[in-house]
Amino acid sequence: MRTGLFVIWGAVLLFAGCGEAERAEDSAAVPDAERYGGTAVVAASYEVNSMNQFASIDEISQELQNFVLLTTLIRYDEDLQPVPYLAERWDTATTRAGLRLTFQLRDDVSWHDGVPTTAHDVKFTFDRIKDPATAYPRASLLALYDSAVVSDSFTVALYLTRHPGFMDAWRTISPMPAHILGGVPPAGLRHHPFGSESPVGNGPFRFVEHRSGDRWVFEANPDFPEGLGGRPYVDRLVYRVIQEPTTLLGELIAGEVDVYLVVAPAQVAQIEANPGTEVVTYANRNYAFINWNGRRTFFQDPQVRRALTLAIDRGSIVEVARQGLGRVANGPVPPFHWAYHTDLEPLPYDPDSARALLEAAGWVDQDGDGVRERDVFKASFEIKTNPDATRQEILTLVQADLAKVGVDVRPRVQESQSLGQDIMSPERRFDAFLLGWRADFNLDDRIIFACSQLEGAYQWASYCNPRVDEILDRVAMMEDRSQALPLWHEYQEILRWEQPYTFLYYDVRANAVRQRIQDVQMDIRGDLLSVKNWWIAPADRR
Amino acid sequence: MSGPILQVENLRTYFHTADGLVRAVDGVSFNLGRGETLGIVGESGCGKSITCLSILRLVDPPGRIEPDSTIRLGDRELTRLSEAAMREVRGNAISMIFQEPMTSLNPVWTIGGQIAEAVRLHRGVGRAEGRERAAEMLGLVGLANPQRRLDDYPHELSGGMRQRAMIAMALACDPDVLLADEPTTALDVTIQAEILDLLCELQERLGMAMIFVSHDLGVVAQIADRVIVMYAGQVLEEGATEGIFSRPRHPYTEGLLRSTPKLTAKLPRLATIAGSVPSPKRWPAGCRFHPRCPHAWDRCREDVPPLLAVDQPSRCWLEEEPQRRTRRGEAGG
Amino acid sequence: MTAYIFRRLLQAIPLVFGILTLVFVILQVAPGDPMAIYMHPSVAPEVLEQMRENYGLDQPVHIQYVRWLKSFLSGDLGTSLTQNRPIAAILAERIPNTLLLSGTSLLLIFAIGIAIGIVQAVRQHSKLDHALTLGALFIYSMPSFWLGLMLILILAYRVHWVEWWPEALKFPPSGMDSVNYDLLSTWGKFTDRLDHLVLPSIALGVSSAASVARYTRSSMLEVIRQDYIRTARAKGLPERTVILKHALKNALLPIITLLGLYLPFLFSGAVLVEVVFAWPGMGRAIYDAIQQRDYPTVMATTFVFAVMVVIANLIADILYAVVDPRIRYERERR
């Protein structure tokens, strides 16, 4: 079963490779000057929250902010190493308290209203993020940063505590225009009309129009500096919200939508079969897991949790519920991460070992009803998830798998916000739940697995292992990767053995693209990564 | 004097229903002279109204005028006219007024509009002229302040006023023939008299012929020149009003007369005819009146009597065998 | 009449406030946390607390209600918790879209429903009548979102593989207009908008149209039997005039009452249809707001829906009076 899975994994990568090769040929045929023009339409089933960096956390908002409307200081290259973007270079210097990071900004980038983007914008953005009144959702990005000092119009120095991956924040934070938002009190920033009605950016595309619940329209910024790639090829970029997957597929087939982000697994085959559309896949940062509530007797025993994982056929889950779009997970460090333990095999599907483990832990079916008991406790519990077709399907498979080893699961689909409330409540109103995380490039799992967080908002597993604490504390400050790697491996080995979560699979993202859109590159860095290079041959334009 | 304006011959109107043939009008013949008023009397359900509707060809399906029926208006054979040509006749050459003034006017259109509609249709005149004619007609039928009444809706008028409006509507195109189907039945007695007077007066002034249908012999006596008595879809007796009322020949006519209240009578007790009108699905064999007839004998049960005698024809075997008239019959029920 | 309208509107005020209070209570009692969309380990609990404070969600329920009521009465509908913009601005965008969709649907419902009803009544018991009755029943029992999906699957999806299918009968599956809408000519804009209206307005309206047809049929049959129809025929009017002028206006009286009943039904139907067809209207605003526990937006959209329903009923009443002089007469005397 596992081999089959890896074949699929390989095929997916291979497929993506082919797509790129064909495009390279096409590209050669059309000279650069003729690539300018046309409208590209991107659609997905979720709403864009806001163009305001201070207010949004959702993936699509961040993509539009960082790749379309605004500019980040740095970007990642294919090896996930920082490369210059708005900042043309940076230096670090050791200080008494830690580190000074100095960014030298480009001097040819302007806000779309003509005002130059300067170091003051960076400092403004930094200060607002650090101000608790702003309630910036991802304030933890700059937790170890202390202050920002502008030394000249295009130079800003940031003071921080030394820590690994300190550059990562600047990949995802785009400076906001101080000349527009500078006078707004921090608590009022998120309501500012900037977010949805009048965003002014400095990126490759300018804001044209937003119709709530319908679309965002951007147009090429002709003044975008040559040094950053110059004016984008397409004239207009439209993002449309279409909630219903069937409808979205219809629009793609009809040619009204060029790029369909996050295709439902069941639709992949149809899109591939349709001439003119193809599916681009890549391993992204998400992984799915079942969280076992460690406050419940049944889940306190690592043997039991391991048994549960052994009993769940995760390979079939990936194949059936995800149509192969995924890879069985062995821990919280996804394969994209440099610290991923490549030699560690995920726990196999092994119901016999699972039964043995359960029995060893004292869980035996005494009354012959097919469900195990220990003392007065029954191996029977509820697994919650949100109303998502794939997750519901997974839950059904999990239920069937666990029934085979004498564990009774009651699947419960609960509407997202109320599920969120149950999960976040201090009483932890759940036995187990199935959800997914997006892992950060700069991974720090202390908030979900550290003993110190046992009463914290995210320590839902109630997992505590002093050795894990020690490892996580150390890797969090260790800048030398070769030194940290053995610790990271040990961490993954421990978690594989103790299974605070049952890690189900690492997600493979499938996006559908009409072939008329050329030079589409999508990878773990983002779906819209290459948006300013997209082009449409004159004959293919609307 | 030229021939009759309307000649009805062997009119048969049958309803072809799912549960059988209903012979509502079964071989009716009569003539209507110019300027003449013909009364049609009979109990409800004997085919009077259907006869009128048949003349206008307004019998709703499954009702149908049977093939060899003849309705001649002047020199036009109405049963053979196209539907479009027939519409030219309706409301124009032949008009009709109905029993229920409360429901015969459309509640959601103004009186003036409803009158003018017919004028505009048949005279091809414009809105203003139609309206003028409507006002003129309302004045003619004796409505005070006709200009203001034009914009009234039916519910704003009393029953008598509505019937006047109906008459105005019917007469708006100067018809040759007016079919008045129980026009006074639903009205108060005093209003009845007013409407009757109005009809008499208008008929004289406009010189039209009129068929006046009523089950009320008293009313018919006042207005009609000639009377036909209908029963079970057939004419039982026909004659001048005077003759019918003073010398009824058919037992049914006699019965009807006896059951009519006379204001002069000291005893207001009314005689009625025994039994009730039979179902039109199964008319009795022989004379259709025989089950209720006090004089009936074997012949009546078997043979259908024709309209016998010339000056006041009666569909009764007594015409041939008057000796069979019994005392019982004359005493009544 | 003006006095009557004014009185009716005054009467509606306590009703609308009752509804709003009830909705507020239901929202508070129902489980769910508007901040749950920010649930991620990188979002510190303190940040969530600060957000709650910024939104005033840390206050006790009754204080929240009084605050909301105060700003509501001063004309401020508040700020959306998820879209972070004034709700008034969102509504200003959304209301016309929903009105366009439900208005078109309404037109469709009554035009098609009445036309079919008339045909059925005039041809009562014919094969056509029976076929239409059966068809109406079939359509009537289809849920609008399912019908919507079927329409998309067939008229916007499958037909792209059917070569002989005419271009004009391929419809866009979603949205209000094409991406290049603002670049089109006025006529182009009009047809583009119309094109986008076809599927959603059918999905939204067709089942109601079926029931309007049923009502019209029986109402027409009732009216056709009336004496004044015979009067109209006796006048020599062509059958068309008899049916369309004399019968229809009377038959419409009970149908107009349906108008008042259908509008709320349409608005609620719009919720699912707007989701299926990605129609950026009120229905989706309320759907998203409820999903995400965006309390102020739910309150504001509920308010708008309630007012629209009140107005719709009022319009039905006024129309009733326009069509039926008897009612008008009574109202004027009152």
Image: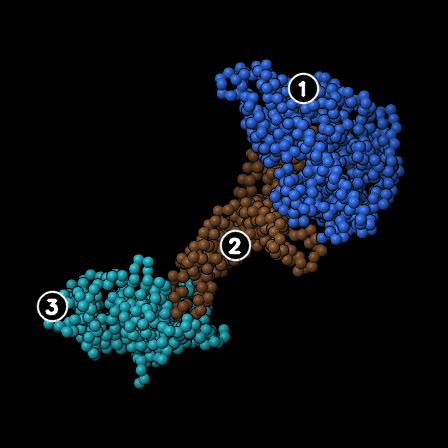
Chain colours: A blue, B cyan, C brown
Contact? badges 2 and 1 (CB < 8 Å)? no
Q: Position of A174 compared to B26: left or right?
A: right
Residue A163, position in %: x, y?
Answer: 80, 26
- Mark 1–mark 3 distance (CA, rounded to whole Å): 123 Å
Residue A96, position in %: x, y?
Answer: 87, 24
- Tell me, yes or no, if residue B223 can be seen here: no
Residue under label 2, please give it.
C109
Give the residue type at disc 3.
Answer: Thr
The residue closer to the viewer here, B327 or B299, is: B299
Query: Is A335 drawn above or below residue C267 in the view shown?
Result: above
SS for callout 2: helix
SS for callout 3: loop
How many marks are shown on the rendered structure? 3
Q: Position of A426 compared to A145: left or right?
A: left
Query: Is A475 drawn above or below residue C22 in the view shown?
Result: above
The residue closer to the viewer here, C245 or A284, is: A284
Badge 1 density bin: few <14, some 14–19, many ≥20, Cα 10 Å: some
Which mark is in front, 2 or 1? 1
Give the residue type at disc 1.
Answer: Trp
- Mark 2–mark 1 distance (CA, rounded to whole Å): 64 Å
Residue under label 3, please give it.
B326
Give the residue type at disc 2.
Answer: Ile
Marks 2 and 1 share the same chain: no
Residue under label 1, please give it.
A497
